[in-house]
Image (spheres, rainbow, N blue to C red):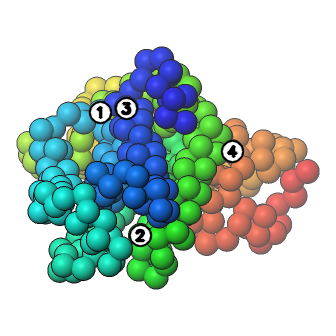
Amino acid sequence: MAIILSTKKEKSIADKILFVWLCVILVQLILFSIISSDEYLKFPYILGLEIPFPLLHGPLLFLYILALTSVQFYRPKLLFHFLPFAIGILSIIPFLMLSLEEKILVYQNEGEGFEILSTVIFVGIILSGITYSVLSLRALAIYKKRIKDNFSSIEKINLQWLLRLVFGLSIIWVLVFFADDKIIFSSVVLFVVFIGYYGIKQVGIFTNKHALELSLTTESKEIIEQCIAEPQITKYEKSALTDSQLKAIHGELVHLMKQKKLFLTPELTLTMVAEELEIHPNILSQVINTVEQKNFFDYVNTLRIEEFKDRIAKYDYQKYTLLSLAYECGFNSKTSFNRNFKNLMGKSPSEYLKECKAMLD
């Protein structure tokens, strides 16, 4: 898979990180296969080199996710994530300085003389696994929030691949607690198979299409780069909008939605609405968040649900099927319609229709 990935044209930063990660796993598996057998007696100079490798997996997972979910990825401070690995290498120097015969003896006696160091490194590996699993999940949660602040439809922005990576590696960290080395490294092999299966299924991993951009329109890609590159923690600090200004802009927004019904556009984005109002997207986001107490995604889909309810109340629309009417109201999939309807109304569309005694074909 590393070879396949290396032949990919127009490799992104994320591709390069994944390539490095696959190579790290490859080297670690080779070292383990040698050391777990008597073959290490032929290559005693490699003993100890495998010890700090587990400290690389957490940072590489985290950086891979950051590379996929952030445009402004280049930061010198990201190198600090590899500091534990560097410390791990420095800590094993006393062992590496031993003669080949002494190294073999230490391994044959299960680390005798280096018990404290082994314990410290083991604890460091566990802490690294837990820390980077949490950081990775947090990065995905922040990314999803930013998406909902800018898009009215998120079905085409698939984060399942990254979630599977996090949970897959987390399972390996759990096994480190309870299993022996052979089970742990067997799970690593399965994890690589897992990367291959879902990576190829995702298509974007091993081809020229970005994993998260696979099904997105060109316009959506541009908006992602503009809107969700960085956490918008301070996005309202310089707006200095008064309550009256917030209400005024909100009034314009409500009027625009009633007149043009922009929410009927399936791929509607925050930027598209902001352009109609001739204001900055961050200002519009503040208005929606503050006045409506919703993100852009929930706000637009609430309007779509209300439009659906209005339409089924009219006799002219009773000749439509449920799904076709949902499409007419701006939803682009049955799953999206059902989920949003139930979240808002607390019941499924069919249950609602029964209560309203609406008869649709």
Labelled disc at residue 71: 1
Q: CA distance from mark 4 to mark 1?
A: 28 Å
Asked if 125 appears above or below 307 in the picture, the reply is below
Callouts 1 and 3 close, C-beta under 8 Å: no
Compare marks 4 and 1 and give the one earlier in the sequence.
1
Q: CA distance from mark 1 to mark 3?
A: 15 Å
Mark 1 or 2, closer to the camera: 2
Compare marks 1 and 2 and give the one earlier in the sequence.
1
> Viewed as shown, does residue 205 lie left or right of 52?
right
Q: Amino acid at mark 1?
A: Val
Labelled disc at residue 16: 3
Mark 2 or 4, closer to the camera: 2
Q: Amino acid at mark 2?
A: Trp
Q: Amino acid at mark 3?
A: Lys
Q: CA distance from mark 2 to mark 4?
A: 37 Å
Residue 2 spot, x, y in % from top left:
49, 34
Residue displayed at 61% across by 72% down: 346
Q: Residue furthest top?
A: 9
Q: CA distance from mark 1 to mark 2?
A: 29 Å
Q: Nearer the viewer, residue 116 or 136?
A: 116
Compare marks 4 and 3 and give the one earlier in the sequence.
3
Compare marks 1 and 3 and give the one earlier in the sequence.
3
Quickly name the residue at label 2: 173
Residue displayed at 31% across by 65% down: 104
Compare marks 2 and 3 and give the one earlier in the sequence.
3
Quickly name the residue at label 4: 333
